[in-house]
Image (spheres, rainbow, N blue to C red):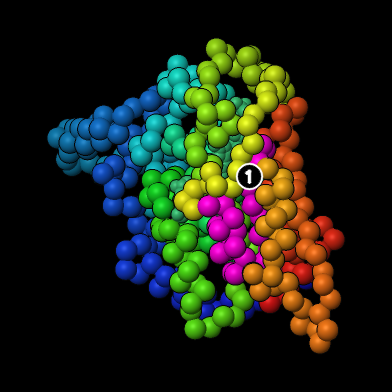
Amino acid sequence: MVKRRQGFSGLSAFVKKAFEQNEHTVDTPPDDPVSLDNGPSTSAVTSQADTSRKASQLEQNDQQTSPDYPSKKRKIGLLGSGLEKYDATGLVPFYTDPSEVPERLSKYFFQRTRYFSLYAEGCLLDSEGWYSVTPELIANQIAERCRCMTILDAFCGVGGNAIAFAKTCERVIAIDTSPIRLALARHNAAIYGVEDRIEFILGDYISFARSYLTRPSRRRNIDVVFLSPPWGGPEYLTGVQPTKPTSETDIGLQGSDADRVEEQEELHPEFTLSQIQPIHGAELFHISRQITKNIAYFLPRNTNLNEISSLVTHAQTDGFASGKEKEPEVRQERVEVEEEWMGSKLKALTCYFGGLASGQEDMFDDA
Ligand code: MGP
Ligand code: SAH
């Protein structure tokens, strides 16, 4: 199977133009109420307002006390010198101690090194990032399965998957509607040294897909689309707010072995694709299938499997079911559902379509 393809000229131009009007690639800090100025390096929880104030006080003191001396080089952001352009320090708090963490986020904080093994280097997450980031080992596993030339991460979040894709794909296009999360993703990517391998685009994936599909040249440029959309918040399983463990021990995360989360598995109502945001999950799939049939879809562990399989039962409507042969064989496409376990806990499902599914590799390069 040859998954690596050369020659994606034309896509770059499209990506640049795609959001010319209202949206943009994040080369500069987003124009947001929260400033992206680097605050002082801090391990404490500091509100943005406090951080900015302290930073400006420091600058004033420097000017008043040592006007004749060259200013000392000091590390002002979590990323350090040379990476200031990507540094999102101060945009959200960098938590290092459980006492700093709001109650609703503490169960996620205890799993921080699962999300980013380099968390201690300064990885940053906002609330939605904390509860939706893909744990690194799972992201790496998915990225290995999606190895290709160009991948589109349609819902980038704080970069859990995009960073992993940057290690296995030549090119990563990462989209998100949140300027904050996109800036955090780029910051986190810089910690992993892969920021230059990812093209961050601030915008709505649905609009992107629709413009991509109407561009004059329909040459295939995107090999794989990865979908990890919002599932409707952390209540997707039970409809209630997550509860707080009282200590790291409660969820079995003592020491370096973070794989021993023991918890009573409850019976959860089934998750249906209609709960996916920003549009029905089936519609999201079918739009994406017009870009490429190689889709990896990251879904809740309680998703209705019949709904997943019915996505390909109606494959005719995607335009990929009929072959190029004179007498096309009727071939039922299959979907491969991979359970993502961490220790004894099932975290999520990744559904592989088209040439990403085992046994269907020959479909990978079909137009
Ligand atoms: P979880 O079940 O909410 O977390 O999500 P956890 O820590 O297993 O909680 P517990 O109470 O079940 O122990 C499991 C995984 O699903 C998370 O680590 C995320 O990777 C992913 N995830 C969760 N949410 C709410 C979303 C979401 O809205 N979108 C996406 N793409 N992924 C999510
Ligand atoms: N895989 C990511 C988490 C994705 S969470 C990670 O590992 O970090 C889902 C993300 O989808 C959120 O960051 C949210 O801002 C984004 N999102 C919501 N609607 C969107 C849209 N229409 N287009 C692109 N991104 C969107």
Residue 127 point in image, percent of width and height: 44, 34
Residue 8 point in image, percent of width and height: 58, 76
Query: Over which residues does the magenta segment extend?
Result: 280-303
Please determine whether, in this image, residue 214 is positioned above or below residue 61. below
| Amino acid type, callout 1 | Leu
> Does residue 28 appear anywhere in the picture?
yes
- Label 1: few (<14), some (14–19) or many (≥20) C-alpha neighbours in 10 Å: many
If the picture is divided into quarters, which one holds ligand 1?
top right
Does residue 300 appear to the left or right of 58 in the view shown? right
Q: Residue at x 75, y 48 (%)?
A: 337
Does residue 199 appear to the left or right of 286 in the view shown? left
Instruction: Name which quarter of the figure residue 360 lies in.
Output: bottom right
Q: Quadrant of the C terminus?
A: bottom right
User: Outermost residue toward the left?
Assistant: 64
Of 294 and 7, nearer the camera is 294
Which type of secondary structure does the marked residue at label 1 adopt? strand
Judge whether residue 240 is colored magenta.
Answer: no
> Does residue 185 appear anywhere in the picture?
no
Residue 350 point in image, percent of width and height: 69, 47
Q: Quadrant of the N terminus?
A: bottom right
Judge whether residue 286 is colored magenta.
Answer: yes
Q: Residue at x 68, y 43 (%)?
A: 304
- Give the residue number, with chain letter if any, for mark 1: 299
Please determine whether, in this image, residue 132 is positioned above or below residue 27. above
Of 298 and 259, nearer the camera is 298
Residue 298 point in image, percent of width and height: 63, 47
Of 188 and 34, nearer the camera is 34
User: Outermost residue toward the bottom?
Assistant: 326
Q: Residue at x 75, y 29 (%)?
A: 343
